[in-house]
Image (cartoon, rainbow, N blue to C red):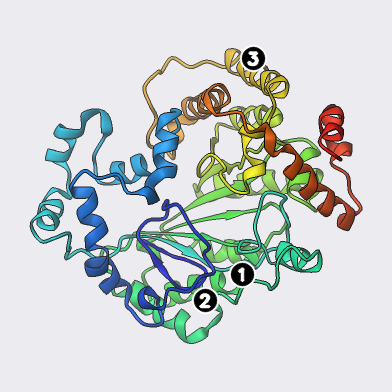
Amino acid sequence: MRINNSGTYESCRWKKQNATTRVNFEHNIRNQTPLNYFQKTMSEFRQELLDGQTPGICSDCYNMDQHGKVSGRQRQLLKAGIQDGFFKKTLASSPLRADLDYSNQNQGHTNRTVSDWQIDLGNYCNSACVFCSPESSSRLAAEFLKLGMIDQVPPSSWCDDPVLLKKFVKDLQASNQLHYLHFIGGETLITPGFEKILIDLIDCGIAKQITIGFTTNLTVWRDNIVDLLAQFKNVNLGISIETMTSLNDYVRWPSQIDKVTNLLNQWIETAQKYNWLVQLRVTPTCLTMHELHTVYDYAWQHNIAVESCNFIDRPEYMRISVLPLAQRTITRQKLSNWIDQHTTSNTDTVVNTRDPNRAHDQILQDAHSYLNYLDQSPDESYRLSDLVRYLKQLDSNRGNSILTYLPEYETLFRSAGY
């Protein structure tokens, strides 16, 4: 399950999202318990899946499947012991088989409690990444408001309300099958709700049964948060970075690659100390695809997996498919060359992308998925003018220039109006 910024429940963390600032009061923490939503309200959606339907909200996952990128759909199946390639056999042996049968015989209802959450904490953020949105960055929201790109900033998050936050923690305590909580922002390390939930879970004595997942943007460090995390069963640490070059400073403005690299190394050392799982989290766009291999290279050297939630869909002008043929060909060649220089003996699909023993296999698998996407995605270079228009607005406000970081794209951007 997922609770989004407005406090509205969602059926899956991977669900294709509309505007998360829209408050659905019918299915909201303010008016409905998570247990009621999960067991009863979700029954219709659950029945669709049991009937073999492919709901439209699952389109991101099917798009990933199409290009050989392991999707959230596959990962969630794996948690139930089910594999696509051996569906019938693994379904029969799944530890959830009895629960699936029960739901199938009772119009999608279930008696289970929620075991796995994605918790959206709001948009507290000290960064203003060019591919982000006001719903996920307070700094970008303020900038968009100043530039007249939005009429108002997103409303406060549900977790800013101490009453709702306390209620949610009590609901977590009541979930006797709870084992994983994944937090997103914003930047989680500066979000008050993140620290408060960690403290409350420790105080109520259930931290040792829970694995915490979260992502940080490599601009801040907080010793007290590290101390809190060390009291949980385990931690899945996501580290956001787009390139190992100064281009990262532009797309993840106003980061500085030297500081980012130092914090990256510090997090890796800390994770090794506590035996935490580490992944580099990327959001490849048309601006960074040609340098994606620099992240793969760092990850390969440190035996760390690289993962993105999906192929970026919004904003549309940031899609990888916006690259014209000439730039796409050069990008493809760089990525292909890197792949050719890095090989493993395994060829099977790595569905458990968090298996530390398969990091190199997973990196190559992810690289191949982007190679496939470059080859197969439609030409959307007609969106270049929209991209340039957007970048000009940001650059004018920031006293910056994309041409400083991407001089090889100057002719292309000039032709599109930069």
Q: Is residue 330 above or below residue 37?
A: above
The amino acid at mark 1 is Thr
Which image quadrant is residue 355 in? top left
Determine the secondary structure under disc 2: helix
Using the rendered image of the protein, determine whether residue 79 is visible from the camera's viewpoint: yes
* Closer-to-camera residue (209/112): 112
Tags 2 and 3 touching, CB below 8 Å: no
In the rendered structure, find residue 337 and report the number of the disc placed on it.
3
What amino acid is found at the position of numbered circle 3 in the picture? Answer: Asn
**N-terminal-most mark, 2 or 1:** 2
SS type, badge 1: loop
Would residue 372 appear left or right of 93 to someone viewing this image? right
Task: Tell me which numbered mark, 1 or 3, is placed earlier along the sequence.
Answer: 1
**Structural distance between the alpha carbons of marks 1 and 3:** 41 Å
Q: Nearer the viewer, residue 36 or 340?
A: 36
SS category of the residue bearing label 3: helix
The residue sitting at 24% across, 41% down in the picture is: 81
Q: Residue at x 36, y 22 (%)?
A: 348
Q: Which residue is mark 1?
A: 191
Task: Identify the residue at horizontal 27%, vertical 63% (top origin).
Answer: 42
Q: Residues within 10 Å of mark 2 (few under 14, many from 20)?
A: many
In the image, what residue type sits under mark 2?
Cys
* Image position of 185 with respect to 413: above or below: below
Residue 159 is tagged as 2
Residue 349 in the image: x percent, y percent?
38, 26
Whole-angstrom CA distance, mark 2 to mark 1, is 10 Å
